[in-house]
Amino acid sequence: MSKKKLTYINELEKFEGQSATLHGWVYNKRSSKSLIFIVLRDGTGLCQCIVNQADVSAEVWEAADSLSQESSVAITGKIIEDERSSSGYELHVTGVKVYQIAQEYPITPKEHGTEFLMENRHLWLRSQRQWAIMRIRNEIIFAIHKFFQDRGFIQMDAPIFTGNAVEGTSTLFETNYFDEKAYLTQSGQLYGEAMAMAHGKIYTFGPTFRAEKSKTRRHLTEVWMIEPEIAYYDLYMNMDLAEEMISFIVDRVLTRREQELETLGRDISKLQKVTNNFPRITYTEAIEMLKSDKMRDMLNDMETSRKEEDPKLRTEMAEIEKEHGQAKKGRKLQIEKRLREIRARLEEIEEDLRNIPVWRKSALEKQWGDDLGGSDETLLTMQFDTPIMVYGYPAEIKAFYMKHDPNDEKVALGVDMLAPEGYGEIIGGGQREESLDALLTRIKEHNLPEEAFKWYLDLRKFGSVPHSGFGLGLERTVAWICGLSHVRETIPFPRMLGRLYP
RNA sequence: UCCUCGGUAGCUCAAUGGCAGAGCAUGCGGCUGUUAACCGCAGGGUUGCUGGUUCGAGUCCAGCCCGGGGAGCCA
């Protein structure tokens, strides 16, 4: 006896001319007197199903007519190639089996605001854009595993509960662990180092938590991090690895998820430039770039172009508002959509004009020793087409475990990778301090409890070796590759300040 | 925590201090190839909350609540 199998929309070409049954949900329905068009969604794609009253029984017609948006249904019919269908195929219905008629589905085929969509995240995931993003996220996750597994890395898991605040800087979520204080991890790195001493090359892949009250398009409180850690790697080998990994991921997404990128309207040419040879600039060079005349000119140009754009948009707005009164229905909708776009852009311009002086001040007055802010990172990445790597930060602003440059004690061998197009830091890492004495000194300098790091210090007592690693933020990577304006759309159920539901 | 913008029908948005409206969604009717289909009719409101100014407040003022994105911090 043959096993029962389902037919999916993404394999319809195999069934051309044959009868097939699709199981899914009603994405949209349109009808005239004797024709009903059902756009069916089955998780693999969309297929338009046509019910012709002349071809079906009264029962089937009534069943089709009763379908509402997101009703669950099995539809049987002949698969026909047809240019009028977006997928290239459509189904001429002969049978309809209703599983459930959906109540009024809240997400209508219309624009919605973010607050409403976030409240309905559990349903929003069914929408086309969200569907495409999740498939790209999956592709990125799979690419990361493939990249490391092909290179002999062992995936190991760091604990999520930790007994101490690792770097002493970030705000962590505190939990009660059988009457003992425990924190949700902000990084698996220290444990990664222990695992690398056992297996040579390892990577962790898991959730990390930050309790900081950041409300921006780049922040979540729960994010997934990928943290490779490699024995006998120095900073430069570490940078080579990070660059190869990012190039590999982007290439996989470009070749295997082209359709989804198109659904998102992503400018693929920008991703095609991401093929190794990322610029590597030292922190000191970055500071010089920020303080340069070129940077000043660029900011002035930005300000001028925003100021010129503003009146142009206002003129256009006045013109189409005037036209709106006597416009026909279709044109009216078009005008209203454009008006919303213009209003949104005007708000952006207003905000930019408020921010540019702040950015200019931050960049031009930057001193060696200052940390780089979000705007500084954006300004730096605007000079390049690919991600860039900034390395050799002032030791003072970096974590205690980072190795210092033997040639310059003030410099730490840390590296950040900044994504282009303003997506900010996607990777942070570096070479770790392998000397027991140096680590003990740093722990004292940072006022950290030596006792909590006893096991970590053991790694420097028993066969300590030079080693390096980095952490990749999955959500920011997904946001960048998908070209999204906010990280909240990169994870099925985002956790952020004020958002614990659904 | 600070700065800034916002909250009007289920949803997206209008409304000089002067009768709370449109589109979508829903229900009913019409239409034989629709692509956010279209056309007609109908139902649908504590204008975030509390107080104040005013003959009169969605609109002005104060406080609070909720949300957007920016600073700090970070992936």
Image (tube, grey):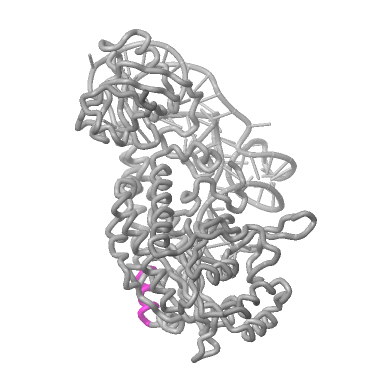
- Above or below A126: residue A72: above
Q: Viewer-proximal residue, A75 or A498?
A: A75
Q: Nearer the viewer, residue A312 or A428?
A: A428
- Please indicate whether residue A295 sits to the left or right of residue B74 in the image: left
Residue at the extreme right of the image, as rendered: A179
Within the image, what quadrant is residue A252 found in? bottom left
Q: Position of residue A403 (x, y in %)?
A: 54, 81
How far across and down, in percent of the image, does residue A463 sit?
A: 57, 79
The rendered magenta stretch, by its main secondary structure, is classed as helix
Q: Nearer the viewer, residue A310 or A10?
A: A10
Q: Which residues are magenta?
A: A293-304
- Residue at image position (25%, 25%) is A79
How far across and down, in percent of the image, does residue A356 sit?
Answer: 45, 69
- Please give the name of the residue rendered at 61% of the width and 78% of the height, measured from the top-left corner: A462
Q: Is residue A73 left or right of residue A222?
A: left
Outermost residue to the bottom: A407
| Picture quarter with the N terminus of chain A | top left
Specify the quadrant of the image occupied by residue A377: bottom left
Q: Is residue A427 visible?
A: yes
Residue at the image position 41 percent from the left and 35 percent from the top? A110
- In the image, is residue A49 part of the stretch drawn in magenta? no
In the rendered image, residue A296 lying in the magenta stretch gets the answer yes
Q: Residue at x 44, y 25 (%)?
A: A72
Q: Is residue A23 above or below residue A65?
A: below
**Where is A228 relative to A413, above or below?**
above
B53 or A287, which is in the foreground?
A: A287
Q: Residue furthest front?
A: A1
Q: Is residue A358 in view?
A: no
Q: Is residue A131 above or below residue A359?
A: above
Quadrant in which the C terminus of chain A appears: top right
